[in-house]
């Protein structure tokens, strides 16, 4: 059985507009749990192929994504966003700096700060990976019709722990504003 066959085994299609089955109180929502696993697998699969040719993995992708979207971000802020150890980030960052994808600079006011920027090579890779993921998202939105983007945004926001939502939304808004200026 191929990976695609396994991925869809047991998942039946419902006619448009029909109600999705709901889990009884306390029962796992197996369909949504599994759909999230498979959607994530495919969402990161295209970038994984590109990254593997460079000897990079998903941690590199996340670092590159957030540094590209937030030029000049502090290493400490990136640690908070990724929720990883300094040691884990250090290995990934060293590779990306050594291979010319990311640049580290000292802070202007505090020389102990390490500020991160993508290089032109890093920006090109970040945009290539985002393009692959955007194509998948755009295709899915096209299948869902009007309002899909906003519905997806509300659902994903609701999935974030309530104590982290505001910070995540501020980060996204700040990155959006920066990309419009740049």
Image: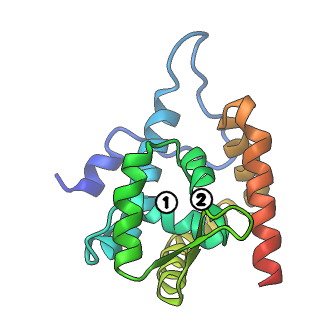
Instruction: Name the quadrant containing residue 172.
Output: bottom right
Q: Residues within 10 Å of mark 2 (few under 14, many from 20)?
A: few
Q: Is residue 149 left or right of residue 124?
A: right
Q: At numbered mark 1, what does the secondary structure look like: helix, strand or loop?
A: helix
For disc 2, the marked residue is: 112
Instruction: Name the quadrant containing residue 131.
Output: bottom right
Q: Is residue 74 left or right of residue 165?
A: left
- Can residue 40 be seen in the rendering of this structure? yes
Residue 107 image label: none
Q: Is residue 148 above or below residue 106?
A: above
In the rendered structure, which disc, 2 or 1, sits on the residue that comes first in sequence? 1
Q: Nearer the viewer, residue 50 or 132?
A: 50
Residue 62 image label: 1
- Residue 74, how many percent across, how many down? 63, 59
Q: Is residue 154 above or below residue 34?
A: below
Instruction: Kindly report the distance in space between the C-alpha atoms of the residues bearing marks 2 and 1.
Output: 24 Å
Q: Residues within 10 Å of mark 1 (few under 14, many from 20)?
A: some
* Residue found 47% across the figure and 81% down from its top: 125
**Residues at marks 2 and 1 touching, judged by CB atoms closer than 8 Å:** no
Q: State the residue lying farthest toward the top.
A: 26
- Residue 70, how many percent across, how many down? 67, 67
Q: Nearer the viewer, residue 67 or 33?
A: 67
Q: Quadrant of the C terminus?
A: bottom right
- Residue 138, how many percent across, how many down? 62, 71
Q: Nearer the viewer, mark 2 or mark 1?
A: 2
Q: Is residue 10 above or below residue 172?
A: above
């Amino acid at each position: 059985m191929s990976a695609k066959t396994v991925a869809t085994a047991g998942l039946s299609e419902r006619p448009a507009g029909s109600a999705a089955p709901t889990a009884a109180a306390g029962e796992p929502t197996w369909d949504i749990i599994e759909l999230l696993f498979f959607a994530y697998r495919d969402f990161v699969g295209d970038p994984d192929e590109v990254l593997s040719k460079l000897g990079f993995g998903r941690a590199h992708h996340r670092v590159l994504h957030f540094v590209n979207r937030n030029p000049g971000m502090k290493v400490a802020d990136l640690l908070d966003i990724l929720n990883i150890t300094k040691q884990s980030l250090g290995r990934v960052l060293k590779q990306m700096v050594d291979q010319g994808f990311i640049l580290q600079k000292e802070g202007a006011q505090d020389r102990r700060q390490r500020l991160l920027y993508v290089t032109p090579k890093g920006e090109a890779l970040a945009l290539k990976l985002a393009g692959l993921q955007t194509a998948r998202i755009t295709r899915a939105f096209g299948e869902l019709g009007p309002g899909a983007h906003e519905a997806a945004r509300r659902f994903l926001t609701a999935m974030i722990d309530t104590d982290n939502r505001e910070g995540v939304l501020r980060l996204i808004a700040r990155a959006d504003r920066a990309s419009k200026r740049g």
